[in-house]
Image (cartoon, rainbow, N blue to C red):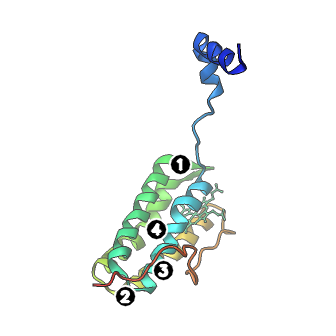
Amino acid sequence: MTLRRSLLALVLAFPAAAAAQSPAPYQPGLGDLMTMTVQPRHLKLGLAGQEKNWPYATYEGHELEEAFERVAKQVPKWREFDIPQLIAATVKQPLDDLEAAAKASDGPRFDAAYRQLTDACNACHKSANVGVIAIKLPDASAFPDQDFRPPKP
Ligand code: HEC
């Protein structure tokens, strides 16, 4: 019997052995979710605002809001901190303002809301004792393959 066949025979005979071999489902931590789902959307929103690309900024504002909703579900408690409550107390209002400004194509209002959102990211980091994580307005794109300018009519 080849090694492959004997492994197959083993797995068929002992399903528990097969289960033991498959790794536990990947559980991203809060820092992973921030880096994967929150930070890129904050950046893309800033770039869209700089380009006055309101349809895309509306879309991406909604994506960021949903990303926070999933963070709240996935990590309701981080160390001693209540993450859904902190999200509601910090970024929720600026995100609502930002979406309203993008929908209204209101550049100055969007810029103000984006600054408030960025301040709110840092306010939460400070509240959760991770003030070393400092978020700022983006000055360059990390996405050279994406066009943030408004679509040509
Ligand atoms: C509910 C509070 C809260 C809000 C709101 C929040 N963060 Fe975080 N963030 C955290 C905590 C806590 C960590 C540390 C998690 C860990 O170490 O596992 C973190 C980690 C991060 C990290 C990872 C740091 C690194 O360098 O690896 C980034 C990036 C980040 N946040 C970006 C943002 C941005 C951008 C926003 C706003 C759009 C934001 N966060 C809003 C609580 C928050």
What's the distance in space between the residues labelled 1 and 2, CA to CA?
34 Å
Q: Amino acid at mark 4?
A: Val
Point out which mark residue 75 bears.
Answer: 1
- Element type at mark 2: helix
Q: Which of the 4 image quarters holds residue 5?
A: top right
At 59% from the left and 53% from the top, the residue drawn is 30
- Name the quarter where the C terminus is drawn: bottom left
Q: Position of residue 101 (x, y in %)?
A: 33, 80
Front disc: 1 or 2: 2
Amino acid type at image mark 2: Gly
User: Is 56 placed above or below 9 here?
Assistant: below
Mark 1 or 3: in front is 3
54 w.r.t. 84: above or below: below
Task: Quickly name the residue at label 2.
Answer: 107
For marks 3 and 4, give the one nearer the viewer.
Answer: 3
- Which of disc 2 and disc 3 is earlier in sequence? 3
Q: Name the residue beneath numbered marker 3.
A: 47
The answer to whether the residues at label 2 and label 4 have Cβ atoms under 8 Å apart is no
Q: Secondary structure at mark 3?
A: helix
